[in-house]
Amino acid sequence: MPLLSSGLVIAGAYADKIRRTLFAQMRDYVRQDKSWAQKVAYAAAQLNRLLYTVLVEQLKIDKGDVVRVRIEYEVDEATKEIKWKWETLQIEAFRRIPQDQVDTLVKSFIGKAAEVAMAAVAYDIVKLGETFDGDVVYSVTLGEKDVGAAVITPVNETLAILKIGAVVEPTPAIFEKARLEIPPGTSMEEALKRALSTVIQTARHTSYDEALKIINAIRSKVAAKPMERVEEISEEE
């Protein structure tokens, strides 16, 4: 059974490493049939969603801490699916956290891993400014960190257009042009947060570098400071 291993990687870069490793392992499938690329990206996004919950939200891992992730998976060629063997998930966290605490936490999520991997993400947004033609630019935050950006065109009180958005956590993704329906009694910002929360199901899953490029292009529209890239450490298996 195939095994995905992230190698030693800083926590701030594990999501992109997971994606690149899975694509490398599945390259023969992707070469034979390009439709596999979307399936691989989707599977990586599911795993990264779970890892974000465990590493960032629960263990409070800092982006400079070192982690290593291992998990087995099955490839269903008939349905073109990658099926994670959640019960094989192993996470090593290299900081002053006892390993038994990490193991206990991982085990507590195994029974609900599939649910957590698809769960909504509680993004918040901060207005960065407006463009000369009336678009509104937002920074997307998760916890206290800037993790993305989005630009919206207001249409009227009940409709806005999400022109483009991108995030790098819990998994790198890009939101393409979409209508934002604004129900009575809610705001455009609430409609945007609702749309962003479905990142696993609706966004296009991509690489860290591509998502960061879009984020900084959006931020540049209002001369906001670019987000900095999180660099990986040199790895050894």
Image: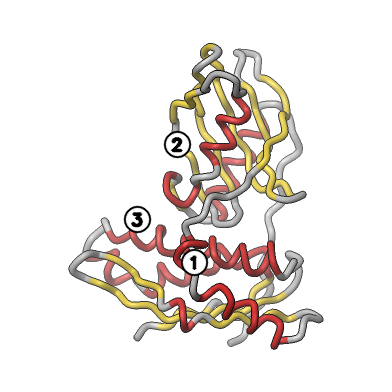
Q: Which residue is disc 1 drawn over?
A: 47
Three-letter code, disc 2: Glu
Identify the mark nearer the N-term, 2 or 3: 3
* Front-lying residue, 209 or 162: 162
Which residue occupies 40% across, 73% down? 84
- The disc placed on residue 38 is 3
**Crowd band around label 3 with a 10 angstrom C-alpha radius: few (<14), some (14–19), many (20+):** some
**Crowd band around label 1 with a 10 angstrom C-alpha radius: few (<14), some (14–19), many (20+):** many
- Mark 1 in CB contact with mark 2 (< 8 angstroms): no
Q: CA distance from mark 1 to mark 2?
A: 22 Å
Q: Which residue is disc 2 drawn over?
A: 176
Q: CA distance from mark 2 to mark 3?
A: 15 Å
Q: Is residue 76 placed above or below 188 in the rendered structure? A: below
Q: Which scheme is used to colour this image of the protein?
A: secondary structure
* Front-lying residue, 210 or 167: 167
Rendering coords of residue 27 (x, y %): 34, 69
Quadrant location of the N terminus in the rendered image: bottom left
Quadrant location of the C terminus in the rendered image: bottom right
- Secondary structure state at the residue bearing disc 3: helix
- Secondary structure state at the residue bearing disc 2: loop
Residue 225 relative to residue 86: left or right = right
Which residue occupies 45% across, 45% down? 203
Rendering coords of residue 89 (x, y %): 51, 80
Identify the mark nearer the N-term, 3 or 1: 3
